[in-house]
């Protein structure tokens, strides 16, 4: 028998949720990411639970022992039980009724097997009881051990139910797949065959999924596979994958906007419903990659992070080493404070002329490597 454990499982606050369910005669299981990640030795971010009881029964049981219940997704059977400040998403077993390629209509079920069958990948359909004993209704453990992301049931059919699963296939491979091995051939072929269906998805869902994919420690092999299968061109037209592996090799931790800037692509703000800030950051990085602006000036004008990003991007895209003394250059620019104030130039200058003069002095000061003093600039 496979048993999973970890602080997230033994935590008294989490066990208290099970106590509440047991007191009401309700079964409960951990499911999904927490079980999968704990088995892989990866960090557990959030706790999903599942039960044959209805959301109403779960709420009554939790409230009876004084736990707070938030009806976060009553329509699809989810309530969040907060214990010790930790949210526990408890979702009633479900089975798919109707699917339209975007969202499944679900019905409650009393059967774990039915609940497992509607999930996407075998490694995402592992259940554990409160002591960590694992139940594996669809053969996920061997796949997890081989780090193989495999669709539950017929891959083509599962994709036609919800085309987001195409992107999830690559996302989960990026995070949990075998870095040395390829993607599951069946799944990959089904994704390629179903690629037209991606057009049905909302920009929000595509963007959220691509963000998770590109935030993996090394998304490059999955992204290359997406390009080869004709998926990337649909969700990120104009993207070029060539420099991404080099960037990932050079960088020190994931950076979503930096990686997007490395790939390129058109209209991502709309296609992925990016925030204004993200879209602006990506556009700035794209502009600066090919500009002849030095790193110190970039750090001065846009901050140290932007300057480091540009250095990494230039190195990756132009196949150059990172510049020597890069850290010093960035630190100098980021810490520099322009020593001249508007008041220093008044009343001699005013209006647009004042702005122009300030800019001229700032340009000279930057060109001097931030060395010219206030007196030198005004003198
Ligand atoms: P993480 O939260 O770490 O990204 P996760 O496995 O918890 O990983 P979620 O997207 O939170 O991923 O989904 C929780 C579970 O719900 C999954 O493990 C899977 O079993 C199921 N699931 C989520 N989205 C889908 C989908 N589109 N089709 C089928 N099953 C899904
Ligand atoms: Mg989750």
Image (spheres, rainbow, N blue to C red):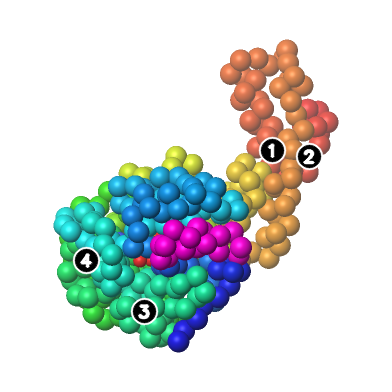
Tell me: is circle 4 under 8 Å from ligand 1.
no
Disc 2 to disc 4: CB gap under 8 Å: no
Separation of disc 1 and disc 2 at Cα?
8 Å
- Distance (Cα) linking label 1 and label 4: 59 Å
Point out which mark residue 364 bears: 1
Judging depth in this view, the residue of 136 and 339 nearest the camera is: 136
Q: Are marks 2 and 3 in contact (CB under 8 Å)?
A: no
Where is residue 41 drawn, in percent x and y?
A: 54, 76
Quadrant of the rendering where the C terminus is positioned:
top right
What's the residue at 81%, 36% (across, down)? 373
Task: Point out the image quarter for the N terminus.
Answer: bottom left
The image's mark for residue 136 is: 3
Q: Report crowding for label 2: few under 14, some 14 to 19, many 20 or more residues within 10 A (C-alpha).
A: some
- Residue 372, label in figure: 2
Q: Earlier in the sequence, mark 1 or mark 3?
A: 3
Q: Is mark 1 within 8 Å of ligand 1?
A: no
Relative image position of residue 15 (x, y in whole percent): 55, 64
Identify the residue at image location x=73%, y=35%. 338
Q: Spatial distance from mark 3 to mark 4, Cα to Cα?
A: 22 Å
User: Is residue 128 something that shows in the picture?
Assistant: yes
Residue 57 image point, x, y percent: 38, 53
Q: Local crowd at mark 1 within 10 Å, few (<14), some, or many (≥20)?
A: some
Per the rendered image, the range of residues in magenta is 11-28
Pick out the residue farthest to the top.
347
Q: Earlier in the sequence, mark 1 or mark 4?
A: 4
Q: Kindly identify which residue carries mark 4.
A: 159
Q: Mark 1 and 2 residues: CB-CB less than 8 Å, in contact?
A: yes
């Amino acid at each position: 028998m496979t048993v999973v454990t970890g602080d997230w499982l033994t935590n008294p606050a989490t066990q208290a949720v099970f106590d509440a369910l047991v007191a009401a005669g309700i079964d409960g299981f951990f499911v999904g990411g927490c079980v999968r990640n704990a088995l892989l030795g990866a960090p557990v971010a959030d706790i999903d639970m599942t039960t044959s009881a209805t959301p109403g029964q779960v709420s009554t049981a939790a409230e009876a022992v004084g736990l707070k219940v938030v009806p976060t997704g009553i329509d699809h059977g989810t309530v969040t039980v907060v214990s010790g400040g930790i949210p526990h998403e408890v979702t009633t077993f479900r089975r798919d009724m109707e699917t339209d390629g975007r969202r499944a209509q679900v019905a409650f079920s009393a059967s774990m097997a039915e609940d497992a069958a509607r999930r996407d990948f075998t490694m995402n359909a592992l259940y554990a009881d409160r002591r960590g004993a694992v139940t594996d209704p669809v053969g996920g453990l061997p796949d997890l051990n081989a780090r193989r992301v495999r669709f539950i049931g017929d891959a083509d059919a599962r994709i036609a139910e919800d085309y987001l699963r195409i992107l999830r296939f690559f996302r989960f491979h990026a995070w949990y797949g075998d870095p040395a091995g390829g993607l599951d051939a069946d799944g990959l072929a089904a994704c390629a065959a179903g690629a037209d269906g991606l057009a049905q998805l909302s920009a929000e869902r595509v963007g959220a999924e691509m963000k998770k994919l590109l935030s993996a420690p090394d998304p490059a092999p999955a992204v290359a596979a997406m390009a080869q299968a004709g998926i990337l061109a649909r969700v990120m037209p104009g993207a070029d994958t060539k420099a991404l592996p080099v960037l990932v090799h050079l960088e020190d931790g994931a950076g979503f906007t930096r990686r997007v800037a490395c790939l390129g692509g058109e209209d991502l703000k709309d296609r992925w419903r990016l925030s204004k800030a993200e879209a602006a950051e990506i556009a700035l990085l794209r502009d600066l990659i090919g500009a002849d602006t030095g790193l110190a000036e970039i750090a001065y004008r846009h901050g140290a992070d932007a300057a480091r990003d540009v250095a990494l991007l230039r190195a990756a895209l132009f196949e150059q080493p990172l510049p020597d003394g890069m850290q010093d250059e960035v630190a100098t620019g980021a810490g520099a404070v322009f020593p001249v104030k508007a008041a220093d130039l008044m009343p001699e200058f005013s209006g647009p002329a004042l702005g122009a003069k300030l800019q001229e002095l700032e340009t000279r000061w930057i060109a001097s490597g931030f060395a010219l003093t206030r007196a030198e600039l005004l003198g």
